[in-house]
Image (cartoon, helix red, strand yellow):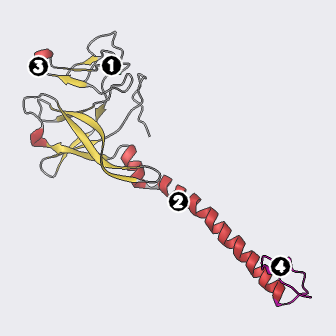
Amino acid sequence: MNESSPSGCCCQREVAPSGGTRRCFFVQAGALFFGGVAALVPAAVGVIAFLNPLRQKGQAGGFIKAGPLAAVPEDGTPRRFALIADRIDAWNRFANEPIGAVYLRRLPAGQLQALQAICPHAGCSINYEGAAQGGKFFCPCHGASFDLAGQRTDSTSPSPRDMDALEVEIRNGGEVWVKFQNFRTGTSKKVAQA
Ligand code: FES
């Protein structure tokens, strides 16, 4: 007698070559196909996220608008600007997130200087101390100090290198754009972080 199994699957029946075995083949082939697709989707999403140029731009040094040129003091005093950009990781996009900070300063020749606000020693945030306190950059964590050009002010500085300079451009007749980049801390060489 040709009875269905309790599960109703035709593959569990012993039948002669017929329409039943053909259905069995298609059921198994379909299960294999959809199982394969289900396994490939997460892998494909991961590869696409890894290769996404926007994701790389957010973390590896694209130009970001820092602010208006008019906001940079004309007397050569550095001013700190927060950098805002979309931050993208493997799975999510976070719009308008603070991703770092930069000090901008007008140079005598009419050019601009941009310095990373992260201390090269261990990654603390560097402060600018105004003219009343000597007009220098100072890291509160371990006491490294830097002059207005971002150079260490003493040979015993805990910082292994000077402050990290960034590329800077003036665009659209008055916008300051900075090529933002983080660098490895604790090393005398300026090594960009991915
Ligand atoms: S982190 Fe700046 S001096 Fe140590």
Residue contact between numbered discs 2 and 3, judged by CB atoms under 8 Å: no
Q: Residue furthest bottom?
A: 19
Residue found at x 30% / y 48%: 85
Instruction: Classify mark 1 as within 8 Å of ligand 1 or not, answering yes or no.
Output: yes
Residue type for callout 1: Cys
Circle nearer the N terminus (4, 3) = 4
**Residue 45: assigned label:** 2
Magenta residues span 1-19
Q: Are marks 4 and 3 in contact (CB under 8 Å)?
A: no
Residue type beneath disc 3:
Ala
* Most foreground residue, 179 or 44: 44
Note whether 70 is above or below 157 in the view shown: below
The span from disc 1 to disc 2 (Cα, nearest Å) is 41 Å
The residue tagged 3 is 131
How far apart, in angstroms, are the residues tagged by discs 1 and 4? Answer: 73 Å
Q: Residues within 10 Å of mark 4 (few under 14, many from 20)?
A: few
- Nearer to us of marks 4 and 2 is 4
Q: CA distance from mark 2 to mark 3?
A: 53 Å
| Residue 16 makes an appearance in the image | yes
Residue at the disc numbered 1: 141
| Residue 136 picture location, percent across and down | 19, 19
Q: Is residue 20 above or below residue 66?
A: below
Q: Residues within 10 Å of mark 1 (few under 14, many from 20)?
A: some
The numbered dot on residue 5 is 4
- Element carrying mark 2: helix
User: Between 43 and 6, which is closer to the camera in this rendering?
Assistant: 6
Residue 185 image point, x, y percent: 41, 26
Is residue 15 shown in magenta?
Answer: yes
Tell whether circle 3 marks a residue whose Cβ is less than 8 angstroms from ligand 1: no
Given this view, does label 2 or label 3 mark the residue nearer the observer? 2
Q: Residue at x 50, y 58 (%)?
A: 48
